[in-house]
Amino acid sequence: MIGELLPLALGVAISPVPIIAAILMLLSPNAKTTSIGFLIGWIAGIVVAVVAFTLLSSLLSENDSDASSPVKGTIQLALGVLLILLAAKEWRARPRGQEEPELPKWMSAIDTLTTVKGLGLGFLLAALNPKNLIMAAGAGVAIGGGNLGTGNTVVVILVYTAIAASTVAVPVIGYLLAADRLAEPLEALREWLVRENTVVMAILLLVIGVVMIGKGIGSF
């Protein structure tokens, strides 16, 4: 089950926008408090989303895990198609030539965020972002339809959350331990992510969408 969820967790982890947001917070005047709040909200949002879809999926899943699962397969096919459509949208939005990439307008206000607002922003980006919702739905369908025991379900969700939150957690924790040494590398990483944001997401969404469609076909 963990292997099945790995691409979806990586899909959340490699999302450039929250990583850029976390880096901007780490380079802001209130770096420590705001970034910690953002990380807590990010983790909470991932957990809430995947747990909600897991509970919903468990109500729809078939009792026999070896039998065909048309409901699960249909959902996976739909999610795969949505991911491929999002990939196409991201690819069309990529900057061309010397064109400056566009970032969400709220990023310009990151310097003024408080800890509570940082927490709320992290939660919203994790739990309500359409891309992450699709990933969480795919994970929830897999977990809920896997007929795992309660203990195994908790372990799988924790592993999924740890992987999905890792790319935000690593720079935040690293900054708290070695702020002076990480400032320059973080700025370089931010610049690269800003420039390649849409291309990274387009390729990632395309790959995961194809994988999801394959799993959906296999569920019938």
Image (cartoon, rainbow, N blue to C red):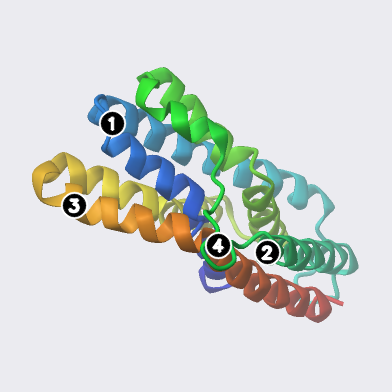
Residue 159 visible somewhere in the drawing: no
Q: Residue at x 40, y 33 (%)?
A: 38
Task: Say whether marks 1 and 4 touch (CB < 8 Å).
Answer: no
| Mark 2 to mark 3 CA distance (whole Å) | 44 Å
What type is the residue that disc 1 sits on? Answer: Ser
Q: Which residue lies furthest to the front in this view?
A: 98
Left or right, 25 with respect to 133, comes to left
Is residue 139 positioned above or below 123 on the image? below
Q: Which residue corresponds to mark 3?
A: 184
Q: Distance between the residues labelled 1 and 2?
A: 43 Å
Identify residue for label 4: 11
Residue 204, quarter of picture = bottom right
**Which circle's residue, 3 or 1, is located before the other in the chain?**
1
User: In the image, is 178 to the left or to the right of 90?
Assistant: left
Position of residue 53 in the picture relative to residue 187 (left or right):
right
Label 4 crowding class (10 Å Cα cut-off): few <14, some 14-19, many 20+? Answer: many
